[in-house]
Each structure stands twice: as structure tokens, then as C-alpha cells.
Image (cartoon, grey):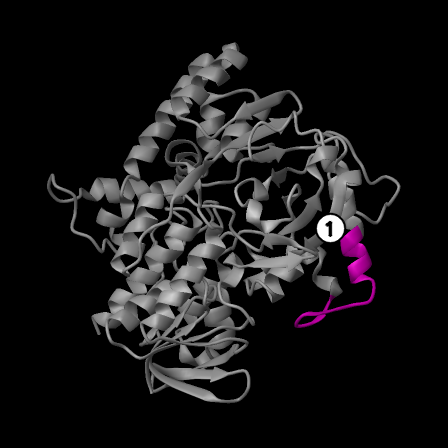
Amino acid sequence: MFDAAIIGSGPAGLLCGLTLARNGLRVLILEKSPHSGGTSAVFSRRGYAFPMGPLGFSHPAIVDALLSEAGLDGPAYEREHYQVAAPGRDIMVSRPLGELRAELIGLYPSEAAGLGSFFDELQRDIGLLDRLEEWHPDYGAPRPPRPGGPVKAARVEEVRRGRRTGCRLSLDRTLDDESLKRFLGGMGSSPPTLSRFNLAVMWNLMSEKGIWSPAGGVHGLCDRLREAYLRAGGELLLASPAARIIVENGRSAGVAAGDGREVRSRWIVSTADAKTTVLELVGPSDSPPEFRRMIEETPYTGSELCVYAGIDPRRVDFSRMRARHLLWTPPEATSAEQPSVPDFAGREIEICRWSDAHPECCPAGRESLVFRTGFPYEEFAGWRAGYRERRPGYREMKRAMASALLRSAEYILPGLVAAVEVMEAATPLTYADWGNRFQGSIAGWGWGPDKAGDGPGLLVETPVKGLLLAGLYASTDLFLGGVPTALFCARAAAERVLGG
């Protein structure tokens, strides 16, 4: 009998398990994959290593504080910088908003007044969300309120209003140029779909707080958490998927593993996404129908096509790439000779020189690059023949798409295609079956205003007694960014277990 059984060994599962084990509880982590780390792990191809998931995260001070509570020192950090390039625009966005505002006014003098109003509203919204987790009841407020008296109900409601209001309203009210609205509303060239709340979160993380890469990578952070967890007496079972959460008399009682055995436990903490946990692992009669309906109807973020390339950098012209991360929108079609391959013209692509921060992950004199672009799961669903099974032709299709994407990227990185020595690709099916995310979702709950603004920000506690959620999908808003939000929810779950 365990005190806590945790589903998933990503950063959240490991931190939650470490916290509980250090407090004397008997803990077991069940991991579906043959390795720990979840999507924060890396994989290797012919001497190159590539990241499966996050390339960095924001709020390193919050991450360090959470690690310190679990008995670990935080790593050193290096700030990641981002450049946005599209036809007619080339801007560095990873810098203070005041600098960005001044540059945009110089580029769009006729929009000066509107830009001033927009940035004033944006910075006000960012200030409104400051230390949200310490005072807003929707986010648990696990810490005492900041000095200065009780939080006013009006401020609480203003945050909720921002969650259910689209940012497009503010953009249309203050600006005329559509391309400028798209840039400020989504940091690219796609139509603005974010809520006003999440627009403030996005720009705060990118420009004010910054995105940071920990020394040793996010995978190295997971390795340290796993080692500390095992030293504290925690148990870890790899290649052991959870098939079902056992519920008896309205309370979770254990986990039925994929191999048929049952793990009995007083508490279950699932770091699988909320849809997988509630709709697939918990039986239909074991949770209230209104809760299941809310989980079912609330949207997730989409999936993506990711291409990994090991290259000889001497053959590539990187002169137009001024930052480690380039968010680039190709202006021209590159796949006309292959009508079956989707065209990448007008589709934003993130290009990352990942091994620039992690040179140990590729052979000497070589580089590991990552290319990512959004793609709906539905466009690939027909290739799925079963769990980790694909229909004939899938591998060839995937390779053709990866090649087309690299040809598109060659527009801004001349010489790229000939420099490639190793190429691998992940589709939405990969994220679903190997990343264990519902329909390949990559970044939590949807960032639009189509979620109830009065609902809980945290979903750590569920209506099933003894069942807690932790990780990226235990918050309906990534108010701290991906990894910090996942760790914050993991700590919140551990506190509830320890509090009984």
C-alpha cells in the first residue's frame, strides 16, 4: 500500500514525488515510457541529441524557489532571445516592452497614438496579473496575501473578465494596420485569438521576465529531480502505463497498470493531461457528469510538426538569424512539385539553434537545429492505425513534409538542405502517442477567451476524492509559463496530500 501513486515522471511528477518522499511518505511513480522525464527528455540519432519538449522556460526565480523547497539548488541560467521575421518586418521581441514600443512607433508613425494606448493597456494588464498565485482565489492563493490589505473583489473580477475577453477588441480599438495587430496579438502573422489575460501573460514572459535555458537543459533538470527522488526513497516504474484509476465508494483507491497488476494507494496524483485523466483513466460513472462535460468541452492548444536536423553549420548562411530563436513566416511556396505535401507559405515556423546552448548534444563542429510549426491533429489522424501504429506510407509522408519544411527554411538560411546530416520529424501523432498528450496538444489548455472566465485557474483538486491533478494541464492558464506552472501545480498537489 502506497501513500501516493503518481502517474507520469515529467518535471511535475518528479517534484511532487520528491516532496512527498522527503516528508516520509511511501511514493510510487508510474511512467508510460521506458525513460523518465516525460516530454522534457531528449532522444538521440547518429550522435546528435534533440529535445522532445520545452526548449526553455520563464520565471527562473520561481523554479529555483520550488526546487529549494524540495532540497535542490537551482541551476545557472542563460536568457534565450527571439527574433520575429516576416515579409516587411524583422524585430527582436525578447527585450523590454518600452524598447519594443519605441521601435514600432518608428516603423508605424501613423499608428503612434494607437500604439501608445495599446502598450499602456498591456502594461496595466501585466501589472494586474503580478503575483497572481499569491492573492487570486482562482489560483489557490497558497501564500499569504502581499502587504497592503485584503484583495478587492473588483481586482479579482477584472482578472476573470480578462480571461473571457478576446484581445482582438483592444487591438481593433487602438490600431488600424492588420499586420501590426497580428504581430502584437500573437507575436507573428496569424489572426489574434488570445484572451486579453493570456496576451498579457505572453508578452510578460517574452519581453519582461524572459525565457531562460537552464544549464544542462530541461532534461538535465529532470535527471537531477529523478536522482533526488530515488535517494529520498521514492520508487519508479518505467514502461508501466496506467490503464485505469481505481475508484471505490467515491474515492480513488489505486491504479490498474497496463500489465494487469493493481497498485493500491491512498492518493493518486496524475500528471497526464486533464482530458486523458478524466475521460480515459477515470470511469464514466466515477466522476460527476458536469465535471466530465467541462473537461470534454474546454479546448486545448493545438499540436505541431517538429523537424530535427543535425547539420554542418559551415555550409549554412546564418547571417539573417540574429537570435537563437527565429519566428519566421515564409513568403513563398516551396512544395509545388509535391501537391500532396502542405505548403508552408504564410505558416509561421520557429527555428532554434538548440545546440548553441547545449554543444554537448552534437558531434564536435556540428549543430542540432529544431524547426516547429503548428499543425492540427485532424490532418494526421487518418494515418493512425492504433497506439504507436501507423498506416502504410506514413513514414514517407512524414519525411516529405520534413524535407519541404527545410526547403522553406532555406529561404532564410541559405545552404541548409545540403548541410543536413541527420533528419527526424515528429507529427501530432508523435506528440499523442510518445508525448502522451490528448490529440498531440503541446501547450496546455487553449489560450483563447472560449473558456469560462469564472472557473478555477487551478484544477489540482478533482471531484473524485483522493485524485489530484498536477503538471501543465492542472492549470487552465499557463500564467507562469509551461515548466514553472507545471512545477507550481506539482507543489500544490503535494501540499494537499501532506495536509490530508
Quadrant of the rendering where the C terminus is positioned? bottom left
Instruction: Tell whether position 387 is magenta.
Output: yes
> Does residue 421 appear in the picture of this structure?
yes
Q: Give x and y (percent) for residue 463.
A: 34, 72
The residue that mark 1 highlights is 422
Q: Give x and y (percent) for residue 165.
A: 42, 40
Q: Quadrant of residue 100?
A: top left
User: Residue extending furthest right?
Assistant: 337
Relative to residue 320, is residue 441 depicted above or below?
below
Instruction: Tell whether position 64 is magenta.
Output: no
Relative to residue 313, is residue 388 depicted above or below?
below
Residue range corresponding to the magenta coloring: 384-399
Q: Secondary structure at mark 1?
A: strand
Give the side of residue 448 with respect to residue 191, left or right. Answer: left
Pick whichever, 279 or 350, lies toward us: 350
Pick whichever, 400 or 236, lies toward us: 236
Give the side of residue 456 with respect to residue 174, left or right. Answer: left
Give the side of residue 413 with respect to residue 153, left or right. Answer: right
Q: Amino acid at mark 1?
A: Val
Relative to residue 428, is residue 235 depicted above or below?
below
Q: Residues within 10 Å of mark 1 (few under 14, many from 20)?
A: some
Q: Quadrant of residue 323?
A: top right
Pick whichever, 430 or 292, lies toward us: 430
Q: Residue at x 49, y 50 (%)?
A: 446
Q: Residue at x 28, y 61 (%)?
A: 70
Q: Residue at x 51, y 63 (%)?
A: 38
